[in-house]
Amino acid sequence: MTAVASLSPAQLRAALAGPGLTLGTGRFTTRLHSPIASVADSIGLLYADYPLLDDTAFADFHLQLTRPLTHRRWLKPQVTLLYDGRSLFRPLPLDQAYPMFEWGLNWCVSSRANRYLIVHAAVVEKNGRAAILPAPPGSGKSTLCAALVGRGGWRLLSDELTMVRLDDGLLVPLPRPVSLKNGAIDVIRAYVPDATLSPPVTDTVKGTVAHMKAPGTSVARAGETALPGWVIFPRYQAGAELTAQPLARADTFMELAANCFNYSLLAAAGFEALAGVVESAPGWRFTYSVLDEALAFFDGLARS
Amino acid sequence: MSGWRIVSGQTLHHRCWDGMAVLYNDLSGATHQLSEQALALLLDLRDDLLSSDDLADPALADLLDNLRSLDLIEARMAPGIEPV
Amino acid sequence: MNDVPLLLQALRRPALVVTLDDAAWDLLLRQAGAANLMATLGHLLDEHGLFARVPARPREHLDWAGMLARRHRQAVRWEVRLIRQALDGLGIPVLLLKGAAYSITGLPPGRGRLFSDIDILVPEARLAEAEAALMLAGWAATHHDAYDQRYYREWMHELPPMQHLRRESMIDVHHAILPKTASARPDSALLRAASLPVAGEPEVRVLAPADMLLHSAVHLFSDGEYRNGLRDLVDIHRLLEHFGTDARFWAQLVPRARQLELTRPLFYALRYAAMLLGTNVPAGVTDELADAAPAPTLLALMDALFRRALLPEHDSCGDWLSPLARFLLYVRGNWLRMPPLLLARHLFHKATLSLRKPRQEAA
């Protein structure tokens, strides 16, 4: 298998700017075109271990990140994201090009992959069972996810897109760089000293954003599904004692549904898939302030 | 009116855990969280297990009204008359 | 011009998909996606017993599209039910047009279709009542700009689109199938009189087969937007194939078109469906319609424009003239719907509006 790392930086830039790069990102294959240097550099850094496919391979998604030809081209350089030539989003400042790729790919999966119930949640696995961590922005989900996989020995399935396969209720991995915001960036730099992080990008709609490279073992096991084990709604609260309250299953169901991208779209199949998750995976409300304590709690779950 | 029935053409998907139920209505595409009793009432209506006397019980009035507002049940006239 | 796009080849002859390699499937699905025909392609392959022979990864994309189409169908049926309830007391039947009509009746163009709005036809005299009843039931007016309001109400043939406050679904209430400002004036009363009930759906009606086909033709060939051009042509093709098994349909088609003053759009519909999708049009019908053809030079121009504009809007389809073709047809579409003075005012107004309001980047 050829990996992205087999290309030199110059070759990578040339491929992206020219015929495009066909990248295996877990379950899906993405063809990416971009003449933008920061995109090539971040792909080279964070996707080094990922499979590289041929130009003639079937690609699930086709993305282009280009610089729009507007009068602001030189004053305020921008980047625009195209899906197979169609513009779908407002342009962003040029320095947000790489995060835009990640957000764009998330959008592709969450808005199209209708064979999966897709929860807006991180999902990590240990000892054969997976913890699903849904959480609205600002709850500390990404920090927790990065800590669990960076130092806690959990396998990363995804930091944003939990995919429940409709056919059998199994969780399908999509391990990609873990997105970190604002304070979380420094927290993870300290907590996971050997983590590889992309250069932080400031002033995005989410604040300052950086991405952490997914552990190589997680990427290597991208073909391995997992069983849902627990649904944990995390909340970071400075100085708080660790608390974990069990949640009634019906409440877990409704709250998970509210956190899905495509629950309503999947109609009865979505209902059945979600019911399956809730039946296998009890729900918890989880408050923490100290990462070591949080990781210990999760390990306790994994051992039970 | 002589009673209620579940909205025609509907298939209900449901689960009940610890006294609380979740329900999917495949006509409206909506999902609801209901008490166990409300679900039981709905399923009895679906299976035609309730008499008009049962349904006239004032204790059920609010519940029936809620179910109607969720588009789960509709009024049923005497046989031969369809609701307008 | 380029070779015939792969998508058109597949629509004409579905069996060819078994010969496609990964790269060809990649291209086919990209063209289908650009043309909004992914679910339709899936249905077509299924109808020909070919679905199981599609390789796993492309097949998954067709499954995704199929799931979306099923959801749309569920939503349309529910919306129609609620529209019917809203208009119930008024004694106005819900006469569905276009996509919603295909979906409710189970006609071939309805399979795999995605919907943005629901279109209904009501008598012009009942328009105000219909609007009031819909507002009572939760639909709200959009396009509050006074110019837009006048555009829709006075010059076009419909209320400004209404959106439901809670469900966010859109309904377009028409009183005619061509604007008041167009030179052809198909009589809506004739359309309503010939309309048919829908089995299993009380108080819901659809246009008679010939009228349904003619409406589809006028919608495509008098309008200016070709983003869904190929999809609309596929609808026409599927309607013709479906209704065309009945000889009476063909016998009535041209006389009805004359009665409704729609022979030119019908001419184009039959011509381009046959040319691009291989529709079988009986020679007798083509002959009967010969006098509806434009002059040869105009026809040559229309061929050049439509043969480009009706392809998927995708880099792999058409040539460098395609964007120009779409633009010219956009202007033509507006011209057909509005007289020249109104057109200038419309295009001018739209241009000044976009300068005054803060620039909205493409969503």
Image: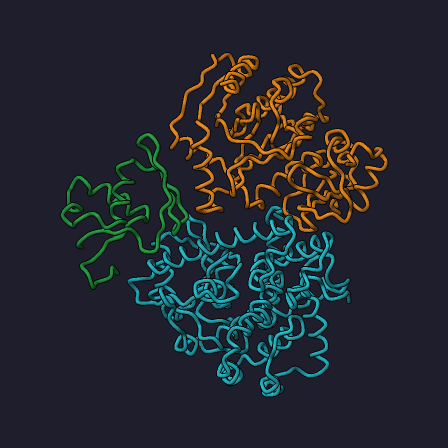
Chain colours: A orange, B green, C cyan
In the image, residue C228 above or below residue A190: below
Residue A252 vs C308, above or below: the answer is above
Q: Is residue A147 left or right of residue C148?
A: right
Taking depth in this image into account, of C206 and B20 the one nearest to the observer is: B20
Residue drawn at x 34%, y 55% is B9
**The quadrant where residue A30 appears:** top right
Q: Position of residue C58 (x, y in %)?
A: 64, 51
Left or right? Give the position of B70 relative to A74: left
Residue C100: horizontal and vertical position, in percent? Answer: 46, 62
Looking at the rendering, in which quadrant would you find the C terminus of chain B? Answer: bottom left
| Residue C318 location, quadrant | bottom right
Q: Residue at x 47, y 12 (%)?
A: A241
Residue A183: in sight, yes or no? no
Quadrant placement of the N terminus of chain B: bottom left
Residue A81 image offset from top left, x and y in percent: 68, 43
Position in image of residue B57 (x %, y %): 15, 43
In terms of depth relative to the viewer, which is nearer, A278 or C200? A278
Q: Nearer the viewer, residue B36 or C356?
A: B36
Residue C27 vertical position relative to residue A120 in the rendered view, above or below: below
Q: Residue at x 69, y 28 (%)?
A: A201
